[in-house]
Structures are given as C-alpha cells and as structure tokens.
Image (spheres, coloured by chain):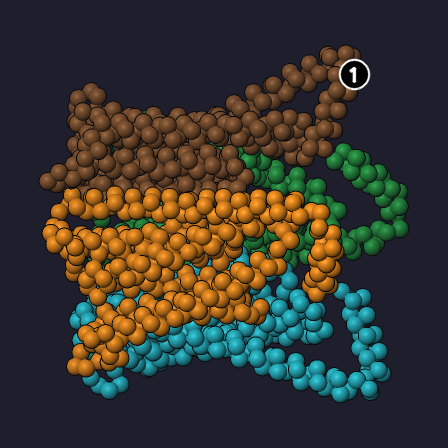
Chain colours: A cyan, B green, C orange, D brown
Amino acid sequence: MANFKGHALPGTFFLLFGLWWSIKYSFRQIQRKKERQHGDRNRQMHTVLFSRIDLIEGALKIFFAFAGIMAEQFVPDGPHAHLYQNGWVKLMNWQHSTMYLFFGIAGIADVLSTSSHHAPVGLDRLSLSLALFVEGFLFYFHVHNRPALDQHIHSLLLFAVFGGSASTMMEVFKRDNAVLELLRCSLTILQGTWFYQIGFVLYPLSGEQWDLDRHDNIMFITMCFCWHFAVALFVVGICYCGVFWSSKWCEGRQLGDMEMGLGKCTASDSISQKALLQESDEE
Amino acid sequence: MANFKGHALPGTFFLLFGLWWSIKYSFRQIQRKKERQHGDRNRQMHTVLFSRIDLIEGALKIFFAFAGIMAEQFVPDGPHAHLYQNGWVKLMNWQHSTMYLFFGIAGIADVLSTSSHHAPVGLDRLSLSLALFVEGFLFYFHVHNRPALDQHIHSLLLFAVFGGSASTMMEVFKRDNAVLELLRCSLTILQGTWFYQIGFVLYPLSGEQWDLDRHDNIMFITMCFCWHFAVALFVVGICYCGVFWSSKWCEGRQLGDMEMGLGKCTASDSISQKALLQESDEE
Amino acid sequence: MANFKGHALPGTFFLLFGLWWSIKYSFRQIQRKKERQHGDRNRQMHTVLFSRIDLIEGALKIFFAFAGIMAEQFVPDGPHAHLYQNGWVKLMNWQHSTMYLFFGIAGIADVLSTSSHHAPVGLDRLSLSLALFVEGFLFYFHVHNRPALDQHIHSLLLFAVFGGSASTMMEVFKRDNAVLELLRCSLTILQGTWFYQIGFVLYPLSGEQWDLDRHDNIMFITMCFCWHFAVALFVVGICYCGVFWSSKWCEGRQLGDMEMGLGKCTASDSISQKALLQESDEE
Amino acid sequence: MANFKGHALPGTFFLLFGLWWSIKYSFRQIQRKKERQHGDRNRQMHTVLFSRIDLIEGALKIFFAFAGIMAEQFVPDGPHAHLYQNGWVKLMNWQHSTMYLFFGIAGIADVLSTSSHHAPVGLDRLSLSLALFVEGFLFYFHVHNRPALDQHIHSLLLFAVFGGSASTMMEVFKRDNAVLELLRCSLTILQGTWFYQIGFVLYPLSGEQWDLDRHDNIMFITMCFCWHFAVALFVVGICYCGVFWSSKWCEGRQLGDMEMGLGKCTASDSISQKALLQESDEE
C-alpha cells in the first residue's frame, strides 16, 4: 500500500468517523443538557435512538474491519493468507490486517456494550483505546531505516494516534465527559487529514518529489501538523454549533406547532399522559 | 534458566493466574451486578466465599514465591545462597529470586488485606503493582548486549509487564472497576503466552535457529505480540461469557427448584427468616 | 526574532498573565471560601464580575494573538504572508504565528465558555492546555543543531511549558482546584522570567558572550531554572497573601461601616430584603 | 561533599523522616478508622495533637533546610556565598543549597497549611512533591561524564525520588489515602538507605575500590536496589503493625481501667457529659 491511495483510504475512514462522531456526540451532549434543564419528554425515545445508532456504528466497524482484512490479504499483490514461504510473506499487509483486526474487536465490544446490560461499563471505550494503541504500536516499529522526513511525518501521526488512545482511555473513567469526547473527535479528524498529508508528501500527485532529508521540510511539516490540528478543532467546533442551532431551530418550530395546535390538543394529550403513566409504571 | 523450560515455567504460572483471575473477576462482577439489581439472598455467603478464595490465592502466591526462590537457589547449577565468591555468583538466579520475592510480598499483602479489617484498603493491588513493576524493572536492565531480536522480544514483554503494573496501580484508586480488572486479566494472560513465545523463538524445539538480527523477524515478532494480545482478549471474553451463562443457567435451575418446592417450603422458610433476623441483629 | 527583544516580548506577556492570574485566582478562591463559610450576600454580584473578567481576558487573548500574528508576518524582515517561494519563507516567523494562533483559539474558547451556558464545561482549560502543548511541541523540534547551552536552556523552558500544559489539563477534570490553579500561575510566571533569562544568556546586553559549550554554564543554568521557580512560587505566595489581607481589611471596614450605620439601617434593610426575595424568585 | 559522609548525611535525614512518617501516618490512619467505627471521644484532642505535630515537623524542615544551606555555603571548602569569581564557584555546593531551599519551602507550606484555614488544601503535599521533583531534576543533570556504575547508581536513586514526587502529587488529589501515604514512607526510607548504599559503593570504608565499569556490578546494584525497596516496605509494615498493636494495648488498658472505675465514675461522668455538651455547642 506504499502509494497515495494506500494513505488516502485510511485517511478517509478516520475523517468520516471523526466527522460522524463530532455530530453524534454534539447532539448527545446538547440533548443531555436539555434533559437536565427541563426534563425532556422524548428522553426514552432518544435513549433508544442512541443505542440503535451505537449498534449500527459497531456493526459498521466490524464490517469495515473485515473488508479491510480481506482486501489486504487478497489484493493481487497481497499475501493471500500465506504467512511464511521461505521467509515472511508481505509483512506490511499482515501488519495492516492486524490493525484492522483490533478495530474489528472494538466494533464487537461496541455491539456487546449496546445490546446487553451485562457487559461491563466502559468496555467500548477501552477496546477503542486499545485499537488505537495497537495502531500506534505497530506504526512505531514500522518506520525504521527510512529517510528523515518519512520517519518524522509518521512519528507526527503517532501524536494523533497515541493522543487519541490516551484520551479514549480517560473516557473509560470519565464517561460522558463532553470535553474528552470532542477532543477524541478532533484527534480522529486530525489523523484522517494527516494520512492525506502523508500521501501528498511521500507520493506527490504533481510528480515533483520532496527532498526527504532537508531540515526545512521537516520544520514545515511539524508546523503543518499544528495547522491540521487547528483545522480539526475548527471543524469540530462548526459541527457542535451547527447541531446546536439546528436543534434549537427544530425546538422552536415544535413549540410553534404546539402553540398553534393547542386547541385540538386536549384529546391526544390525555392519551400521551396515559402513555407516560404506563411508562413510569414499567420503569 | 536460559532454556525453553526456564521461559515455559513462569509462562505457565502467569497463564494460570490470568485464566483464574478471568473466571474469578467475571464471577464477582456478575454477582455484584445481580445484587445491585434485585438484592441477592446469598450476599453474605458470597462475601465469605470470595474472601476465603482471596486468602487461598494469597497463600498460594506466598508458597509459589517461596518454592521459586528455593528452586532458583538450590538447583544443581544455582548459587546455593552464595552471593559473592571472587565475583558475583549466578546473578541471573539471584535476580529471578528477587522477582519471586516481590510476588511473595504481594501474597502476604493479599493475606493481610483479606484476613484483617485493619489493613489499609488497596494494599493488595499496590503490592501486586509493585511486584509487576519490579519484574519489569529488573527485565529492563537485563537485556543489554544481546542480539537485536532477543532484546526486542524481551522489550515487548515489558509492554505487558508495565501495562499490567499501571492498570493494577489504577485499581488502587478505582477499586472494583470491571474494565480494569479484565484488562489486568488479559495482560497477565498475554504475559504468560509471550513467555512461551520467547521460549519458542530463542530455544526452538524443532532445532532450527531463528536469525536474531534480521529486520523481518523483528517485524513479525512485533505483529505476533499484537496477535497474542488479541487472543488474550478473546480468552478473557470467553471466560466472562462462560461464567455469565453458567451463572444464568444455575439461577434458572434454582428458580425452577424453588417453584417446584414452593409447597413444602413454608416450614424451612420460617427458619431461614429467623436466621435472617438473627443476622441483621448481629450486624 | 533571534535577539533579546524577541525573547523579552513573550516573556513579558507570560509574566503579566502569570501575575494577573495569581491575583484573579487568589481573589476567587478566597471569595469562594468566604461564601462557603457564611454565605456571602454579594455572591451573585461576584459571579457576574468574574464572568465579565473572564470575558475581557478572553478578548485580550484573541487581540494579542491576532496582533502577534500580524506582527510576525508584516515586520520588515517577515514573510509577508508568503509561505513558499523557491523554498520555505521565514519558517521561524510562521512557527511563532502558529503558536499565537493556538493562544487565540484558547481566547475564543474562553469567550465561548463565559458567554454561553451551552459550551461544554472545561473547554477553556482544555484549549489553554492545547495551546501550551503546541507551544512546547514546536519548541521541541525547534532547537536541533544548536550549541549545547542553547539547546539546554530551551529544553528547560519545555519543563515549564509542558508542566503548565499538564497541570491545565488536570484542571479540566479537577475544576476549581486551588492548588492546581496556583501551580499554573507559578509555572506561567516561571515561563515569563525564563524567556528573559534566555534572552540575557544568548544575547547578553553587556556584550560579553557566554561560552555555549562549557559544562559549568549548563550546570549553573539548570540550577538557575530552579531559582526562577522558587521566585515564581514566592511571587504567587505574595499575591495570595496580599489579596487575602486586602480582602480582610475591606471586610473589616465594611463591618465597621455597618455597625456605625446600624441605627439608620432599618429602612434600607427592608429594601435589600425585598431585593433578596426577588432574587431568589428569579433563580 | 564527594565522600562517604556527604552521602550519609542526607541518607540519615531521609531515613529518619521516612521512619517518623511511617509512625505518624500509621497512627493517624488507625485513629481515623477507630473514629469512623465507634466515634472517638478523644477526636478533638487528636486533631489538635496532629496539627501541632505537623507544625513542629514543618518548623523542623525549615530549620534543617536553613542549617543545610548555611553548612553548604560556609564549610571551609564551600563557596562562602560567592557565585562567580572568574568562573562559577563550587557549583556542587550551590546545587545542594538549592535542593535544601525547596525542602525549606515545603516546610513553610507545612506551617502555613497547619496554622491557617485560609491556605489552599493540599499546599503541603504539592510543595513536598515539588521539592522532591527539584531534587530529582538537579540530580538528573548532575551525573554526566561519570563512570557507568556511578551514573547507574545515581539514576536508580532517581526512581525513588521521582516515584516519591509522583506519589506525593497524587496525594494532592487523593488526600488521606492510606496506601499512598505508606508508599511515600517506604520510598523515603528507600531513598535514605540508598544514599548510604551510594556512599558505601563509591567511597568504600574498607578501602577496596569497586570496579566502576564492570557489567556484573551494575547488575548486582540494580538487584540490590530492589532489596532495599523490599526492606523499606518491610520496615513500614513493621511500624504499622507496631503502632496498631500498641494502640490496641492502650485501648485495652483504658477499657480495663474504665470497668474497674465504673463504680466511682458517676460523678466525673456527669462532668464529662457536660463538657461534651459544651463542645457540641461550640462546634
């Protein structure tokens, strides 16, 4: 996978997951805040919705991990599930498969945590943290004997990976901490965009090669990493604000509808009150 | 102990402890969850059972540590308790004895914590964490001047050892955290299987030696470590599920028995009620 | 900016912010303690005051960051917003701009946290922590290929920077912890004075150059860093005591006034009681 | 101070403080546990006693730090408060003075924390943690260009110093955690005995020099450090048990006295009841 596409593919995945998480967690946080303030009527509906979303997310992780492993193994120049034939076969592909495997495990943990009350709390975060740790761990021993800039650009990636792993590990203990969740989102987006950056630098599309040993380039790339992070923070901020305003706008419209419909509301209201009473009986 | 058996022995111990802990902590967590949900009648019985198990575990640790120290000292080519005779005598054996010593101390702390209310809470976890730290500490200064693969394979072990030490240290502050306990179990199993792996690589049973300086081998071993971890996580998961289902099955049978025996239950029930009253008086 | 002024400028900023924080946090802590002890009548007033102060602080951060970026870009020998012209243009200036950018982001987070209830709690501390981390991160890759003393004196700065970043990150989880706040103040002052020290050592005003490779000088500088820290701790202590005594003195005078005015107080007192009742209605 | 005495002196101080702390914290923990169980009548007396002890301890720290600084400066071959005379004067002595200075600051923080309610909680632990950190920090940059064993034996000391600093920092957040306090005690004793060990190895009393470059010696010293730690843990354990049993024995005697004196107790009892009532009024 030592080409531009090989870096763009994981980059796209991390980018999509980062963006998706920014929206999901923003929505969840805003919802939670609303409930705390004036008790949301739709609380149960939201809980069900969120757990269904988590389930789908977990299933997607499993699917992508499985697809990734298959792709790494059975691309034309892949190892085709052979590990040793007079020497190790295509260890790079095996390493990538291993990384996918752990993200698949994280997906399984997601599904278990969501679908059963009996899974220990925090299992999903722990497994995600471990998946990121293993990714960083394999990358760390990945880049020996390469030119200075190649090493440097990969080791910068490790800041995003291990940072994400550490912040996710913190989430095991400080569950539902808004700031940690947003930090994870931005570090995931950072990882995504940085994969692209690695692709652009090592396999430039324009054809003109970078000088991999110039100190200037290393200095620029270090700074560029910070810019990517600033952009990632900015994107997460935009998502949060967008979700916040759209949720406010929806609420406003609902309120307007309710006020308009207040006259004909009496009958259906008594029904919903009954439903609420039943609910509280069931709880 | 620089042979296959010398690595298989500690490996077996860690493997057994890891498996045992996976079962013990799974059982304890499931029990605790049940109690919280619908107040278990057998709560006191379980508390006594668990503290008795912890006592036995501590005693076993002490015994194994003592046996290990004796074995290291008095095997035919051991130091026979001599430390200095025109130069240090068999420092390797002394180092292993030191490691066992700290696991023995952890055993003593276990016994104290279980048998007395006056021992400070968390002493057992702290001492286990210190024992693992000392093991890693001695291993770290153990592998100078060896071939690249030998160093690498031992330094990978350190990830499992220090990881276990750190997660156990966390348990001092976050006692009875399910996720941390399972993480410790899987890191202990990982340590056990990795000891075997070290044995297989450095002293291959088939006789064919590994090339200890090839970069390929190092890359494979790094990845192999991740596979061991995945297997360890899988084993812990299996244990948890197994304990969960068997506990559910037992409960179902108990419930069935109870329903069948409901007719003749009145006499014995009043007795057990009396016992319960007495208990609550004693508390 | 490789001259004395280039180090004195950020030094002055950190010094001022450190001093300002020592006063602000001392005042806030003492106020909070008073309220807890005998419920302060002026509580609401203080909350409003503090949030207004935080708003101004945030705005100042944004302004200074913006001014700093502009200055770095458009000084006569700056890059004038050009990044690449047959090679990277003035990367140092770009790096400094990047640092300012993150302090600007911290300012924005301050403003958001203060002006809206909907921003997640701890956002201001997280963004400050990230700003300090990025500062340290860029400095870390900044000092390759320099003389020993130059490297050493900059790497000592990193202790203050990363220490500040870590302690601010802790504040995300342990909000309003008095000790952490004072530690952050002293580390910020330390950073300020150390920037001056770097300036004095590398660009001595007296003209006599330091020998940048002598081990003696390195030893002295290490120790000197500790002295700076001791002074910073001392300054924070002085600020705390000063605020404490002046707040006590004010209170004493208020009490005196109240006692003297006790006779004519009845009318106004009933008014203030009404105001209090209204307040509690509004809450 | 590059001789045996120069290492024995700080060693003795750390050893004494470690032993003293083991007794003090054991006593305090046992007392606290007793109070929680059956509400101690002597609670107020104990609080006063402990705060008086802490005050004395702080004063002693200040005194010793001051004496240490004076001794380092004005011993015959000391710098006599001269810092620069055609080159730095006796930087070693200045470094040691700096270390003492921070322990003096820790003493001042102790006195402030104990004597005033207005000092922020945890100030004493933070300042002790910083003092240990500065000690380790100066030692770390202290041992360049020395033989391998000399470097190694000093860097082992750093494990005790930084370990102590980290565990004391934890105490800022987890105040009165029994396990952390005992860990600090044992790390302080370890530091004390290890200073002696450094003295014995580098300046052997018997006159026979150690070979400072043999790998064997380094291996032994590493292991020896673990033994020191085991001994330190053992000593702390003994202190805890000793305090526990003696406190139990005292209580037993008190109880015996009380039972014997039960007849004549009525008069004095009513008095003590009155005292108790007064106390609860005062609270």
The residue shown at (27%, 40%) is D139
- In the image, taking residue C236 as reference, residue A252 lies left or right, namely right
Q: Amino acid at mark 1?
A: Thr
* The C terminus of chain C: image quadrant: bottom right
* The N terminus of chain C: image quadrant: bottom left
- In the image, taking residue B123 as reference, residue C60 lies left or right, namely left
Relative to D27, is D86 above or below?
below
Which quadrant holds residue C151?
A: bottom left
Residues A123 and C6: in front is C6
Residues A99 and D115: in front is D115
The chain letter for the residue carrying disc 1 is: D
- In the image, taking residue A149 as reference, residue C253 lies left or right, namely right
Relative to B102, is D20 above or below?
above
Give how far across and how far down residue D69 sits, in percent: 29, 31
Residue pointed to by mark 1: D266
How many neighbours does mark 1 have within 10 angstroms: few (below 14), some (14-19), or many (20 or more)? few
Which quadrant holds residue D49?
A: top right
- Residue D235 visible in this rendered orientation of the protein: no
SS label for mark 1: helix
- Residue A198 visible in this rendered orientation of the protein: yes
The residue shown at (66%, 48%) is C261
Give how far across and how far down residue C36 sits, in percent: 62, 48
The residue shown at (44%, 77%) is A235
Which quadrant holds residue B227?
A: bottom left
